[in-house]
Amino acid sequence: MALQCRLSGATFQSLKLATIPISSSSSRFIFRTLPKTLNLALFSRHSAPKAPPFSVLIRTLSAPAVAAAPAAETSDIKVVKPQWNAAIDFKWIRDNKEAVAVNIKNRNSNANLELVLQLYDKMLNLQKEVERLRGERNNVANKMKGKLEPAERQKLIEEGKNLKEALTTLEEDLVKLRDELQIEAQCIPNLTHPDVPIGWEDSSKLRNMVGSPRKFDFPVKDHLQLGKELDLFDFDAAAEVSGSKFYYLKNEAVMLEMALVNWTLTEVMKRGFTPLTTPEIVRSSVVEKCGFQPRGENTQVYSIEDSDQCLIGTAEIPVGGIHMDSIVAESALPLKYVAFSHCFRTEAGAAGTATRGLYRVHQFSKVEMFILCRQEESDMYHEELIKIEEDLFSSLGLHFKILDMATGDLGAPAYRKFDVEAWMPGLERYGEISSASNCTDYQSRRLGIRYRPSESPSTTSKKGKTNVAATKIVHTLNATACAVPRMLVCLLENFQQEDGSVSIPHPLRPFTGGVEAIYPKSR
Amino acid sequence: MKGKLEPSERQKLIEEGKNLKEALTTLEEDLVKLRDELQIEAQCIPNLTHPDVPIGWEDSSKLRNMVGSPRKFDFPIKDHLQIGKELDLFDFDAAAEVSGSKFYYLKNEAVMLEMALVNWTLTEVMKRGFTPLTTPEIVRSSVVEKCGFQPRGENTQVYSIEDSDQCLIGTAEIPVGGIHMDSIVAESALPLKYVAFSHCFRTEAGAAGTATRGLYRVHQFSKVEMFILCRQEESDMYHEELIKIEEDLFSSLGLHFKILDMATGDLGAPAYRKFDVEAWMPGLERYGEISSASNCTDYQSRRLGIRYRPSESPSTTSKKGKTNLAATKFVHTLNATACAIPRMLVCLLENFQQEDGSVIIPHPLRPFMGGVEAIYPKSR
């Protein structure tokens, strides 16, 4: 039986899981103090999956990082070890369980909060038991240091041996419990900003609309037809060479891609972001820590054969990884990156009408913004990111709306997500061109990114202690500055002219060597 | 058996027919197997070799041309890794954690420099009549093989995608070669000249030794590649054109380099002739390959199935009653590196470093970097 972890978005991930053996002899000490059967709700938890609508920049509910293992409803199932641990605050979850439960429900997540709380309790109890036994063993060891009758010594040796065996067993059980707790707890989605509407796509709230649909006084063509007439792409040759949803860009489309990337990088750099190019092959553990699922069914992630590596679907992943497992100085924050990379997505499970031409492809260029900041500042930087996007898309002359995405559409990592949908006259609808997410501490707890607050001027420092403040977890945010194929759709369809040419927006012209329009070629 | 026959005669013929049919089926199966085995063996035969190519290994390669001379430094020079560290241009350590060794992030001015190199190179090559392209970086493994690479060999350079027949490209030569596969182009369309920008991925399995530091040997890099399909008689001429373009590009950046006519042992199966460009890298204290221009004649096109139909000749010679369609011929294909970014970065950083720790940007690139003239150390 597979554990289904819900996604926001249409693709459905399944994760195979197992749990601690119930009746193996090694567990006898657990069951002295604990309930006889572990909660098997794990296997009976199926809500019929609703079918949420699409989002390209889709994210899965994080199922934890485990090696897939067959799960059976029998008792000889093996514990699966998480490949990495997230720094989850179990105590906080327990102390705020009502809020966490409501959040899980609003997000339509399949996380099993009850099980997490039970496992946490068991773990605490088991820890106490282990400590108690350790204490006893120390006592025995101490007693054996003095002068003893042989019979007494023998008895102590026996006792010591028994304690040691018991301890070993308990310690193994503790490890397994911790592992299972990790696995279950990693499924719990991020909290939600109080202003986020509850529900599915229909419930998303309009934040802002910029511009209005252009009125055409001639028949409008879609980007595929424009591309064909202006000799800008080749999908047919790519289908032979690579498969469907691949393409070559040709002629002015190449210059337009270069111009979009260059202009976007330049504009975002002006706002204090450090430019980067990134690896496009990364370890799968990094993909998971960012909240994606490389090995789920219908995964969006391409894996490399004979390796633990994957192709990135967004630069968010390698950028998130830069500071993993480290402590940054508070004075270094905020760290603001703008990264250019190619992105690869399997688009498995993507069906339906919205797959023509450049709208949904396996490979594309993207400029991504990423911020690491102090906890108190993430809301502010979320506003900053969406403002930057608004500025970029307005200056290109696009008409678009900005949506505050509802809880069902957030995906596990996002505390709040703004989507930008631009008007695509050829497709006769709005299409998502960008997404800005505040992931608060969800990714950083998994990536292990902390900061050390600067010391406060100190009449309060304790005498004799070193003045090193406890570390805090950073908050991370990410936002699309430019996803090239959808921008090409927007530019071609919105700026087409009656004579078949396409005007190039003014800000891009310096980056196309001054080219002002794409004209039909005489044949 | 169509005519009228005695029953016993018919029976004899039926027997005979049956025997013949069985014998034929067996033979036809054998023929298929033989053809398959012939293909497999024959595909191993390398391309022919241009008569002027020196015979032997690397030492036998012949110097065609040298441009410029090594710059004289009057201060201690640094290699690109040290320059990159001091100017905060790359991060290999974070990439090793995130991805593995031989991966890297480019930062700050190095990003702008990569963009400038790509843009400038594309612009320059387009001026010479090449059609610009970006290409898929995931392709079917059969296309990789038809271009002369071996995705599944031991120590293969090729990354494969799990649960699929797809691979990552090591060069845009592959997807560009694939554009016209299994087709017949009109002679009037030739030559087809493409300049393609792509990321490239190489496992570098089996690459060992000293030449692996920093940007010199990496798993992923950006590259601008030139590709020509032409008539058979013209490939030598286009080979000269390609190497001339490379020479122009690298001279205008102010690099010092030599062009080698590679010896037979270094050609690789597809190349009829191959010119390598090795540029002076003062930090590494040696010449390093930054580019390669190969004439593959019909090796790739026979595998990719790319033919052209010669235009008809003015015709007192056409045979009466036959359609005037000339027999198709195989095109010749050529490929040449216009710009391989990491090695260009090595060259630019090491050659144009200044005593104060800055690096001068070559003039042709400056318009493509928003006018930036140099990379300066950042005050801390």
Image (tube, coloured by chain):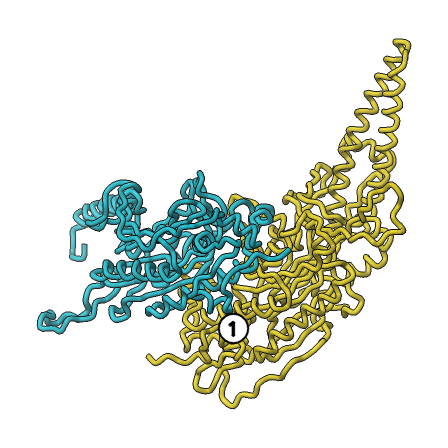
Chain colours: A yellow, B cyan
Q: Quadrant of residue A345?
A: bottom right
x, y percent for residue B231: 24, 63
Q: Residue furthest left?
A: B316
x, y percent for residue B25: 27, 46
Question: Is residue A333 shown above or below A133?
Answer: below
x, y percent for residue A198: 77, 68
Residue at 19% across, 48% down: B13
Q: Is residue B281 left or right of residue B83?
A: left
Q: Please name whichever residue, B25 or B265, is drawn nearer the observer in this view of the structure.
A: B265
Q: Is residue A466 left or right of residue A206?
A: right
x, y percent for residue A461: 87, 48
Quadrant location, the C terminus of chain A: bottom left
Residue at 69% across, 64% down: A437
Residue located beneath label 1 in the image: A488
Is residue B39 something one can see in this rendering? Answer: no
Q: Kindly identify which chain the residue marked by label 1 belongs to.
A: A
Q: The residue under label 1 is which amino acid type?
A: Leu
Q: Please name whichever residue, B375 or B266, is drawn nearer the observer in this view of the structure.
A: B375
Question: Is residue A170 shown above or below A97?
Answer: above
Q: Secondary structure at mark 1?
A: helix
Is residue A252 something one can see in this rendering? Answer: yes
Mark 1 is surrounded, within 10 Å at the Cα level, by few (under 14), some (14 to 19) or many (20 or more) other residues, namely some
Q: Quadrant of residue B42?
A: top left
Q: Residue furthest top?
A: A150
Residue at 43% across, 63% down: A238
Q: Is residue A288 left or right of residue B140?
A: right
Q: Please name whichever residue, B265 or B190, is drawn nearer the observer in this view of the structure.
A: B265
Question: Is residue A165 shown above or below A107?
Answer: above
